[in-house]
Image (spheres, grey):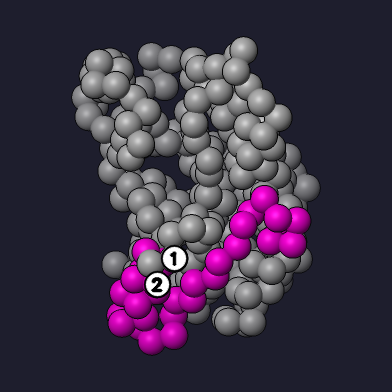
Amino acid sequence: MNPDLQGKAALVTGAARRVGAEIARRLHAAGADVVIHYRGSGADAAKLEEELSALRPRSAHRVKADLLAPIAPRALVEAALAQFGRLDILVNNASAFYPTPVGGIEATHWEELIGSNLRAPLFLAQEAAPHLAKQAGCIVNIVDIHAERPLKGYTVYSVAKAGLAGLTRSLALELAPSVRVNAVAPGAIAWPEDGQFEPAERARIVATTPLARVGEPEAIARAVHFLATAPFVTGQVLAVDGGRSVFL
């Protein structure tokens, strides 16, 4: 792979597993040093740190933080600076995802889903912005195709991701010209591990995806890498969904 991120440092939230881990691997393979944020997946984070450090010594560092805690954004940015001395890329990937049908929504659902999907990215971006500006850096937010058209039964999640798409565009204006801000909107990328979607629903999703399959985490990682290295792209939300948003 072309080492187009050589000498740069990236902070990826929710990076211990699944899509986040693949993003961390991709940026690392392109030459970046990587801060692996995690909350509960400590063993997975340690394994990923070991994997990446074996490829390039002292190039990966794991940091535990609860993104719902007000101190988390500053702590994460300070950890990245302490470890690598700079910050070039912030990837807001961490996300809570579960159904909240109207009639059963509780305040705790709102606080967690808005907190992880919208509030944390905002305050991480704000904390990181001065340091990203020094490096002409960038922010990549992981949104969702349902930011545009809500997912039935997932009201609060859909609202949170719609807010994150709006935040992406707003930050692109606020932080220009020093920092670029974009987002990736995944479609069906690896099914949730908790069985939220029944087999019939999974079949329906695949049937309404023009490429007729579920995507792999690598597809999102490739898109993040592209946006991290595209010098004249900002304020954009890139759908990576096998064409499914055409049907929504």
Which region shows up in magenta? 44-73
Picture coordinates of residue 233, whole percent (x, y): 56, 47
Picture coordinates of residue 120, whole percent (x, y): 67, 49
For the residue pair 67 and 219, the one nearer the viewer reads as 67
Q: Residue at x 26, y 33 (%)?
A: 214
Label 2 neighbour load within 10 Å: few <14, some 14-19, many 20+: some
Contact, mark 2 vs mark 1 (Cβ under 8 Å): yes
Q: Amino acid at mark 1?
A: Gly
Q: Can residue 45 be found in the magenta stretch?
A: yes
> Image quadrant of residue 25?
bottom left
**Farthest-out residue, bottom:** 57
Q: Is residue 81 above or below residue 224?
A: below
Q: Residue at x 61, y 36 (%)?
A: 113
The label on residue 42 is 1
Q: Amino acid at mark 2?
A: Ala
Q: Inspect this view and state whether residue 222 appears.
A: no
Q: CA distance from mark 2 to mark 1?
A: 6 Å
Picture coordinates of residue 127, whole percent (x, y): 74, 61
The label on residue 100 is none
Q: Residue at x 25, y 16 (%)?
A: 200
Q: Can residue 197 be found in the magenta stretch?
A: no
Q: Is residue 113 above or below residue 149?
A: below
Identify the element where label 1 is drawn. Answer: helix
What residue would you read off at disc 2? 46
For the residue pair 225 and 190, the one nearer the viewer reads as 190
- Quadrant housing the C terminus: top left
